[in-house]
Amino acid sequence: MTNQRTSKLAGALGQLAEHLQWLRDEGVAAVAADPKLVQALGRRVPTAGHAAAGAGRKAGDQPRARAAASPAAPAADAPELEAARAALADVAKRVAVCRQCPLGRARSRTVPGQGHPHPAIMFVGEGPGEEEDRQGLAFVGAAGQLLSRQILRMGLTRAEVFIGNIVKCRPPGNRPPLPDEMAACLPYLREQIAILKPKVIVCLGGTAVKGLLGVTTGITRLRGQWHSCAGVDVMPTYHPSYLLRGGGEDKARWWEVWNDLVAVLARIGRPPPPR
Ligand code: SF4
């Protein structure tokens, strides 16, 4: 029970950290926070201290020096991380005003993706859903919560990876993005990959595989096998929402995904957590 609570709290703090980062990228210099709460969080959940650290940051601090020490990210110094963050913010700014495909007309907010500027692992899904469209953040709905649990089980936090999508605007009714829409949006993703320099991309679901690799073979046959995109190793696996079909988690599929993620951990040189 305690582990479950700690897990949930760490997940919530990871999302808080992402939201603070998003606010910062949007130009918000400070947010109000109860100092007692920040202090308590830092004391009780040291591994998620990055969330509280963002809230208490002063002008001139080097907030990303902590990220540079993350064992899940390739070594990078603070200026390099700041440069990557600025380049990602520039992509997000252009995405925010983009109307290059019909999805730009129906969206509430663009969802450029969020996370570590130099992650070992980048997750790519197909497109924002209703909750993502509302918040402007990738994978924050039910499927996102499952992805968070998978990332935590890998021994990582959401702040240590980057999470994005093939298209940055919500397709109406959560339908899969059309080939023309994916083609119009793909340059943004390619730019992000070049900035992030991940060691591995985890492609979530058949549509993401089709958009990123141009492969039309079904995900059931593709998953678990290594591919390559722009010199980066790509592991296709099931989309979290596929595991949630029918109202509960599909255990058999869950273990297939877990085996794929264990292969990803091995590829980046991290031992898998115990089963
Ligand atoms: S989905 Fe991509 S290409 Fe289409 S409008 Fe949105 S940002 Fe532009």
Image (cartoon, helix red, strand yellow):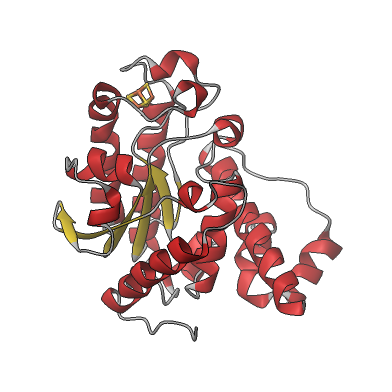
Residue 91 sits in quarter? top left
Residue 223 versus residue 40: which sits nearer the camera? 223
In the picture shown, does residue 96 fall above or below 213? Answer: above
Residue 62 x, y percent position in the rendering: 51, 62
Residue 275 x, y percent position in the rendering: 50, 83
Q: Residue at x 42, y 18 (%)?
A: 104
Q: Residue at x 86, y 64 (%)?
A: 36
Residue 72 versus residue 143: which sits nearer the camera? 143
Left or right, 151 with respect to 210, comes to right
In the picture shown, does residue 229 fall above or below 75? Answer: above
Residue 69 sits in quarter? bottom left
Q: Is residue 118 visible?
A: no
Report the image quarter containing ligand 1: top left
Residue 31 versus residue 128: which sits nearer the camera? 128
Q: Residue at x 46, y 48 (%)?
A: 242
Residue 22 x, y percent position in the rendering: 55, 43
Left or right, 205 with respect to 252, comes to left
